[in-house]
Amino acid sequence: MIALLDLGNTRAKFALFDGVALIERGVVAWDDSVAFALASAWADWPRPDRVVAASVVDSVREAMVDEAAVAAFDRPLEWLRTPAQACGVRNAYAEPARLGVDRFLAMVHAYRSGRAPCILVSAGTALTLDALAADGSHLGGLIAPGAQLMYQSVLGATARVKPDAVGQVVDAADNTADGLFAGCWHAAAALVERFTARMAPRLGGHPRVLVGGGDGQALAALVALATEHAPDAVLLGLAACATDGETLLATS
């Protein structure tokens, strides 16, 4: 039994992996009382053999989760940092560690589950896109603000764009609230479509488009392409790497 932790920008997700599937799941937002929330969530879990984590957050939050995991499970926490190559996937970055480990793990899951060639989209605080070839080669990707972050940044950077309420997604707005909200979401959807069109010839012409992240389903509904929902991709990729036998993990 392995406890898996995915520390993202907005929240921490966690699950128990029994060697076949995720059998327990949970999520905690960073604005909660994280230590208390984690202790409560893990109180009834069986003691895992290992605790494995992937993180895109700062060292302060990592240390907080590390302490909570050791207190709950009495196990050292093992961290996966982004490698140049592992589990069949080859990182395109010249400096491999610069690629977010969440993006790498999503590619591992896509490759291991037979869904490459594909475009991987993660819609959350940031919008990330990656192209993965059938042989596990990462062809690179893009990073942009997520739709909600775009929306908040316009509000924060302008004096008069102050809608009274959150708008709706429409094709063409006749008010500021809808214009701003729809503009941000359409921009995110258009980037997915453009990246897919540009990368498709290098991926054999018809790659799958896998969409995950907290805003993944909302974004997929706006993309003018066939998409596939990809929940828990980071946790499942982490499970694959944790059980692969390669020396990728460092104990805290």
Image (cartoon, rainbow, N blue to C red):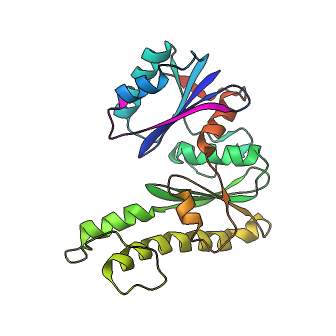
Q: What residue occupies the far top of the structure in this picture?
A: 74
Residue 122: % across, % down: 55, 55
| Residue 94 or residue 181, whichever sits in front | 181
The quadrant where residue 45 appears: top right
Q: Residue at x 57, y 39 (%)?
A: 82
The answer to whether residue 24 is magenta is yes
| Residue 109 or residue 169, whichever sits in front | 169
Q: What residue occupies the far left of the structure in this picture?
A: 159
Q: Residue at x 32, y 41 (%)?
A: 31
Q: Is residue 90 visible to the viewer in this orientation of the structure?
A: no
- The answer to whether 205 is drawn above or below residue 54 in the figure is below
| Residue 179 or residue 189, whichever sits in front | 179
Q: Residue at x 46, y 27 (%)?
A: 41
Q: Residue at x 53, y 63 (%)?
A: 218
Q: Is residue 150 left or right of residue 239?
A: left
State whether the magenta stretch is mostly helix, strand or loop: strand
Q: Quadrant of the N terminus?
A: top right
Q: Which residues are magenta?
A: 22-34
Residue 210: % across, % down: 66, 57
| Residue 177 or residue 75, whichever sits in front | 177
- The answer to whether 72 is drawn above or below residue 115 in the figure is above
The quadrant where residue 201 appears: bottom right
